[in-house]
Amino acid sequence: MKVRWIDAGRVTDIRSQSIYHGLGYALKEHSPNTIVMSIPENPYICIGYFQDPSKELDLTYCNKNNLPVIRRQTGGGAVFIDNKQLFVQWVFHPQSIPQKVEQKFQIFIQPMIETYKFFGINAYEYGGHDVHVKGKKIVGTGAAYIGNAEVVTGNFIKEFDSKHMVGALKLPNEKMRSEVDRSMSEYMSSLSDEVASIPDFEEVKKVYKQKCKEIHGMQFIDDDFTDEELLEIENQEQKLLNDSWTFSIKQPEKNCRLIKIHTGVWVGSTSYHVGNQTVNIVMRLNENSVDYIDISFKDNQHKKEIKLLEKKLTNMSLTKPELSMEIDSFFSLHGSDWSFLSKEQWIEALMMIYVEKKKISGGG
């Protein structure tokens, strides 16, 4: 398969996103399948197609730290992007790649996996569309049908800036912020985390190009954007820079805030009210298991019982039957007079984050 190879080099924040949008809309029957490599010059926050930035982001933090917000046309969550990331963008004719989502991502990530292996990093496919190493995500991907093209995107990361990533998120409390920060450290990786000598991006490009040839038999034609494509890229920039596009999605207020760390790992925060009493819960789920939990009453009462309950719930599978059994056992040992929640209310409160995760991801 012949593929046009465009090394766009260092580009502006908006150009790093407008390229694949523009190529998608400019794609004609005679247009080549194209792989573009680029490095954003300046940092920004990129949100997913279905996200409401006013609900997802601390816009005051973004403004204060000179982080523009760009809403892309692919799905997924908010991500921090800077010049320590090398973008890989495929803009292909739909008939050129499999239409099944799993197969599409598989052919996309294979050369990335082999590139990491070349540099001594034992990378592998995880969750059907991500690349992991030692249980941590090192590549996230996205895909969408844009214009006339199938677009698939990913990146190589030298170093991940979790400070700005966590700082830019709109989170309901500091306990959740601390847990999101800790979880990103535990479950995210980068080149600098895995190898002592970080390869230069020019070297990464060469190896990646070679792996695409070896794995998929791609015959590359080094080229550049056409004038027609550049015009469409510029048109897309005007759209992506417009607040009417960025802020067009309005999501309802929710009592549950969830952040996906990677496939299967989520951090959530919720509040459950009984009369004028409130219990606050911050929880990390690893698949369906409680990986971490922090419970607090509004007035900080009953710390001893709460700590014992947290210990009992940690590492358990979050199902209603198991919760019912564990809370019965806990009340038998420690009594229930201290709690303003009944067993049924505890089950409902503890299941809120899990239920919301199921709504968003179907359990993934």
Image (cartoon, rainbow, N blue to C red):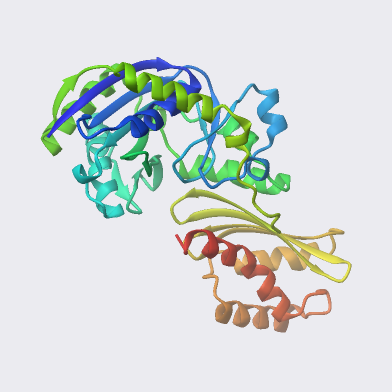
> Is 326 situated above or below 163?
below
Residue occupying the point 59% across, 63% down: 356
Percent position of residue 22, x then y: 39, 28
Q: Is residue 144 left or right of residue 178?
A: left
Q: Is residue 279 left or right of residue 185?
A: right
The residue nearer to you, when weighing 74 against 182, is 74
Q: Is residue 239 left or right of residue 34?
A: right
> Is 154 situated above or below 126?
above
Image-quadrant location for residue 318: bottom right
**Quadrant assignment for the N terminus:** top left
Percent position of residue 329, x then y: 65, 82
> Is 69 situated above or below 364?
above
Percent position of residue 93, x then y: 24, 39
Percent position of residue 336, x then y: 78, 80
Image-quadrant location for residue 310: bottom right
Residue occupying the point 22% across, 44% down: 107
Residue 82 can be seen, yes or no = no
The number of discs equals 0
Q: Is residue 248 left or right of residue 229?
A: right
The residue nearer to you, when weighing 191 against 142, is 142
Residue 332 can be seen, yes or no = yes
**Quadrant assignment for the C terminus:** bottom left
